[in-house]
Amino acid sequence: MGASSSGNELRLDGGAAVSFRDPLPRMLLKATRNLPRYDFLASVTGIVIDQLQCDRVELGLRKGDREFRCETVRTGDRSFRFRGGFGPMSDATEDWPSVVRVRLVAGDENTGFLSLFSRRPGFFTQPAEVFQDIAGTLGIVLARQRAEWATRERVKELTCLYGVAQVFENPGTGTDAACDQVAALLPPAWQYPEVAIARVVLDGQVHGGPEAATGAQSQRADIVVAGAARGFVEVSYAEERPEIDEGCFLAEEHSLIHEVARQMARFVERRQVEDDKARLEERLRTADRLASLGKFAAGVAHELNEPLNAILGFAQLAGKAAGVPEASVRDMDKVVKATLHAREVVRQVLLFARQAAPRKAPVDLDVVVRDALAMVEPRRAERGVEVRCDPCRGPSTIAADEGQLRQVVVNLVVNAIQATSEGGHVSVRVSMEEGQALLVVEDDGIGMDEASVRHLFVPFYTTKEIGQGTGLGLAVAHGIVTTHGGDIRVRTRAGSGMRFEVRLPVE
């Protein structure tokens, strides 16, 4: 078989003259469609092999120091096989009697080669200029498609950045909602959106696609807040995609994911500042309310103390008077108990309202705990609760106000006893750890939910029934521990008991 040529016309196998410009409109039409680069190369090389009636077309494209090669091989009358990747495509075991290779220029960036193969000897006999013209036409089409493809990719990326900016600039967007929205905005901006899956992981919380979807083809950028990594933004492909030009991920996509991670970090920092400001303002409001409440409570308590003492005294005298009926004596006992309870409430109010600094002196914490447990023994016996004490294995002396410290232990143990049903257990443990005294009061009672824990140390807040508590015990304990330079930590869960850890400085 032979071929003759005239200008851009090729006469192959003695057939009709065919101009290579004939398939140019078909190629340009492919270039204007929104095809991935890999699919586009498969289409145009198929057009070339169909037009020239050869058996194989190999295309090499270089960008920087990388070279992508693809080939289309005729497998039937109108059927072809396409493959591509980085590295040589030629199959050394096959015999190609007719081969022609010319330089290919596709725009300013991509340069490479075009190779044509035929299994028939002497198939390509036309001058080299004709094949160079073919390569030039193909280069025009490749450059056009690459420009339109790059434009589409940039539009997708800019659209994504705009959407992300809108999410972060919305003052009503919470952190979780922002992560969810960003994870939804990312996949359409990537080269293969149909299989792209995005995840935003922040502080261990996963937003977006499942972790199991992460494959070998993935990229991520850390979310760094105040110098610490708090999570990452990740985009992966659910199915493997071919690498072309810059790989399965573009350089612009690498920049995009890191920019989104940076914006996410700034958003988290801004939200933290706003949250800290809100918490500080709430603390100031709470402190102001507590100060006013303390003054009011102290005044009311002082006004109530005198009539309560009078009621208590007269009730006790009336109960001991001669000739008082037995029913009246029982009634007087009820008055005495009610008055003692009211006086205890007043004492708690006064203790809460007191603003005097603690009078610190060397105090043995084990002794304080033992005295406090002796004071609550009647309540323990009444509830049928077992209290276990584990004293410190060594010296347990700290600088503290003994009376106030005893009040802390009493309040915590009473709270634990009230939260524990009959037959339950309360444990009290004292230890020294790293220059601090540790007092642990733990029960196996009903525990608390998260909403109740947030109000645990708020004055007059209680989950107990009326008459079972004032809502001041834990608030008083918290205030005393704070004025001693310590802190109280709470661990609880509804139905699984409570654990209070009081940490106090030794000196």
Image (cartoon, rainbow, N blue to C red):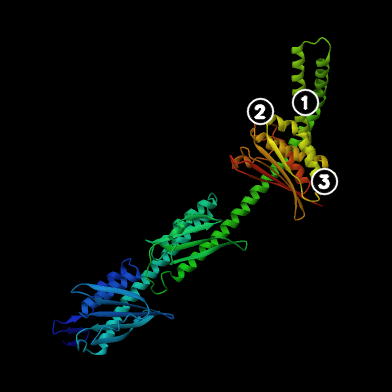
In this orientation, which residue lies closer to the viewer: 498 or 453?
498
Residue 92 in the figure: left or right of residue 211: left
- Look at the numbered discs 3 and 1 and tell me whether their residues touch, using CB distance below 8 Å: no
Badge 1, how many Cα within 10 Å: few under 14, some, many 20+? some
**Dot 3 or dot 1, earlier in sequence:** 1
Residue 364 disc label: 3
Residue 149 disc label: none
**Dot 1 or dot 2, earlier in sequence:** 1
Q: Is residue 224 above or below residue 5?
A: above
Q: Residue 290 at x, y = what percent?
A: 73, 39
Q: CA distance from mark 3 to mark 2?
A: 36 Å
Residue 466 disc label: 2
In this orientation, which residue lies closer to the viewer: 238 or 422?
422
Residue 274 in the figure: left or right of residue 337: left
In this orientation, which residue lies closer to the viewer: 484 or 269?
484
Task: Name the quarter where the N terminus is drawn.
Answer: bottom left
Q: Residue 143 at x, y = what percent?
A: 35, 76
Badge 2, how many Cα within 10 Å: few under 14, some, many 20+? few
Q: CA distance from mark 3 to mark 1?
A: 30 Å
Mark 1 — residue? 340
Where disc 2 sits, the SS reads: loop
Q: Amino acid at mark 3?
A: Asp
In this orientation, which residue lies closer to the viewer: 486 or 319?
319
Where disc 1 sits, the SS reads: helix
